[in-house]
Image (cartoon, grey):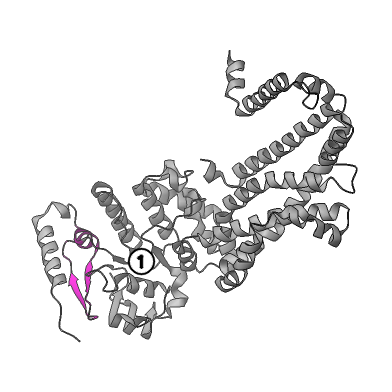
């Protein structure tokens, strides 16, 4: 009974099974070979596990590299804009103009500038995440109450101490929110990016299966893409609990 | 109590844009004494406190703390903010330890014992791992006071320290502030709108008027046991209120 209660209580498992049920219903009603049976797809899944693992690794590494670089650029840039009102006034119109443009539209530009290899693919994801990161961090810094800076001033805190005790901890929740918002759109864009000049990556795997009209294989790729997203969300959740324990309480 | 003037303000004025907020202030605070600063709204009480804290600079006049410029005294001055200024990411223990880390306290083990002793005095022992949002208003107030006192400041400035608390909690916090001030012999200057608080916590009550005059009233009920049970305490409150409403002649 306890095991059943645990399974039912786990939102992740419930969510996944709801997806399978929804898929099965569609499969039964639509009755087309474009939508394969979930059962057949899962049996097929284990036959392509090795090759799918390799493709997933390619996608994961691209997203991880892009996220790391985005954090390295976005946090200092966001803090810089947050603490320098004049610079913020100067750059905000540029950020507000760039931010709403669908970043996938820049894919041809990146292909021309950085070639067809991994650099253009990673650059596209950086381009998606970094503006979200800069704006979130900037807003986080600007929302720090004046009294918090006065507390630091009253103890004659150095600039380094202000960053350690005040600025960095106060922006951490914004960093995690920005990452969470960016993950979905990053994976969607990665799918586009993995459709040219590469033979590895989940995007390539899905499109390759589609051209071969192997719909079981195509759905295996879609499932894995979902799992990659889930993996990133869970990773962000864990990092957030570790680095911002006050927010979790 | 020493007779030595610890904070001296000579002909201090503060102007914000076109508006003159403080006008030719003359003030001297003795070391180890507790001062309550009261006055009508908009006379510049908080501005005066911010000037002494060094958060803003006077437009005119001179100020010294402990014989030196205000800037140099910053390490020995603590400020208790009206909104407390507690950081949401710091536990009670971390918040109280922060001033020592900022001062680069070398003997951190000894400091921990000091923190634990203060936690006990402020009745915060069982809450040391809690975050501010997990505490009640009175508990947060005690944390902010403990954070202000841990570095044993020579001067403690408080801006309406109990304004957001209910009357029972307020009285408890006032007792704790009084006990710590007496123990550490800290020079205390606090702004309040609550005349009862001023009479309970202020050895000397400073009444700031719009024209810049400061009236000093010696308070016989300061640090008296059961002061609030005496009729004279409330008579003193009435007298102070009358003095507040009376404008003194221009200097």
Residue at horizontal 76 percent and vertical 36 percent from the top: A225
Residue at horizontal 58 percent and vertical 52 percent from the top: A174
Residue B75 visible within the image: yes
Q: Relative to A186, does residue B75 appear above or below in the rendering?
A: below
Residue B106 visible within the image: no
Residue at horizontal 28 percent and vertical 55 percent from the top: B174
Q: Which residue is mark 1?
A: B157
Residue at horizontal 24 percent and vertical 63 percent from the top: B193
> What is the x, y in percent for residue B15?
35, 81
Horizontal relation, residue B30 to residue B124: left or right: left
Is B64 a magenta residue?
Answer: no
Q: Which quarter of the figure is the N terminus of chain A placed in?
A: top right
| Magenta-tinted stretch | B195-224
Task: Look at the numbered disc 1 and give the secondary structure of its residue.
Answer: strand
Is B207 a magenta residue?
Answer: yes
> What is the x, y in percent for residue B123?
37, 45
Pick out the residue farthest to the top: A1
Mark 1 closeness class: few <14, some 14–19, many ≥20 residues within 10 Å: many
> What is the x, y in percent for residue B179?
30, 55
Q: Relative to B103, does residue B65 appear above or below in the rendering?
A: below
Q: Chain of mark 1?
A: B
């Amino acid at each position: 009974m306890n095991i059943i209660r645990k399974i039912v209580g786990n939102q992740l498992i419930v969510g996944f099974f709801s997806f399978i049920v929804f898929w099965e219903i569609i499969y039964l009603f639509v009755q087309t070979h474009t939508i394969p049976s979930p059962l057949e797809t899962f049996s097929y899944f284990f036959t392509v596990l090795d090759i799918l693992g390799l493709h997933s690794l390619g996608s994961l590494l691209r997203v991880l590299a892009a996220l790391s670089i985005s954090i390295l650029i976005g946090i200092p840039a966001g803090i810089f804009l947050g603490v320098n009102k004049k610079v913020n006034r100067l750059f905000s119109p540029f950020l507000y103009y760039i931010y709403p443009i669908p970043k996938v539209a820049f894919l041809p530009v990146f292909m021309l500038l950085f070639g067809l290899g991994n650099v253009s693919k990673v650059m596209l994801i950086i381009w998606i995440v970094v503006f979200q990161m800069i704006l979130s961090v900037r807003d986080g810094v600007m929302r720090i109450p004046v009294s918090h800076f006065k507390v630091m001033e009253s103890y004659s805190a150095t600039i380094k101490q202000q960053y350690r005790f005040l600025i960095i901890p106060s922006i951490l929740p914004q960093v995690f929110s920005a990452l969470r918002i960016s993950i979905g759109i990053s994976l969607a864009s990665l799918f586009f990016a993995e459709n040219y000049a590469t033979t590895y990556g989940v995007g390539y795997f899905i499109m390759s299966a589609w051209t071969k009209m192997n719909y079981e294989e195509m759905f295996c790729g879609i499932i894995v893409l979902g799992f990659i997203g889930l993996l990133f969300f869970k990773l962000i959740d864990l990092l957030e609990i570790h680095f911002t324990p006050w927010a979790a309480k | 109590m020493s007779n030595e003037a610890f904070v001296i303000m000579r002909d201090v004025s503060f102007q914000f844009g076109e508006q003159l907020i403080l006008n030719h202030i003359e003030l001297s605070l003795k070391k180890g004494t507790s001062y309550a600063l009261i006055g009508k709204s908009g006379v510049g009480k908080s501005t005066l406190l911010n000037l002494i804290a060094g958060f803003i600079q006077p437009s005119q006049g001179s100020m010294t703390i402990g014989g030196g410029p205000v800037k140099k005294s910053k390490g020995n001055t603590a400020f208790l903010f009206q909104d407390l200024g507690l950081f949401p990411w710091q536990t009670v223990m971390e918040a109280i330890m922060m001033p020592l880390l900022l001062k680069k306290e070398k003997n951190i083990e000894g400091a921990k014992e000091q923190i634990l002793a203060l936690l006990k005095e402020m009745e915060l022992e069982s809450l040391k791992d809690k975050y501010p949002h997990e505490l009640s208003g009175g508990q947060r107030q005690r944390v902010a006071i403990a954070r202000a006192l841990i570095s044993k400041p020579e001067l403690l400035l408080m801006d309406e320290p109990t304004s957001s608390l209910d009357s029972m909690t307020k009285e408890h916090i006032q007792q704790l502030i009084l006990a710590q001030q007496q123990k550490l012999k800290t020079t205390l200057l606090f702004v309040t709108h609550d005349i009862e608080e001023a009479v309970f916590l202020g050895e000397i009550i400073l009444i700031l008027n719009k024209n810049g005059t400061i009236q000093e009233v010696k308070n016989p009920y300061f640090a008296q046991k059961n002061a609030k049970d005496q009729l004279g305490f409330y008579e003193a409150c009435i007298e102070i209120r009358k003095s507040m409403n009376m404008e003194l002649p221009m200097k």
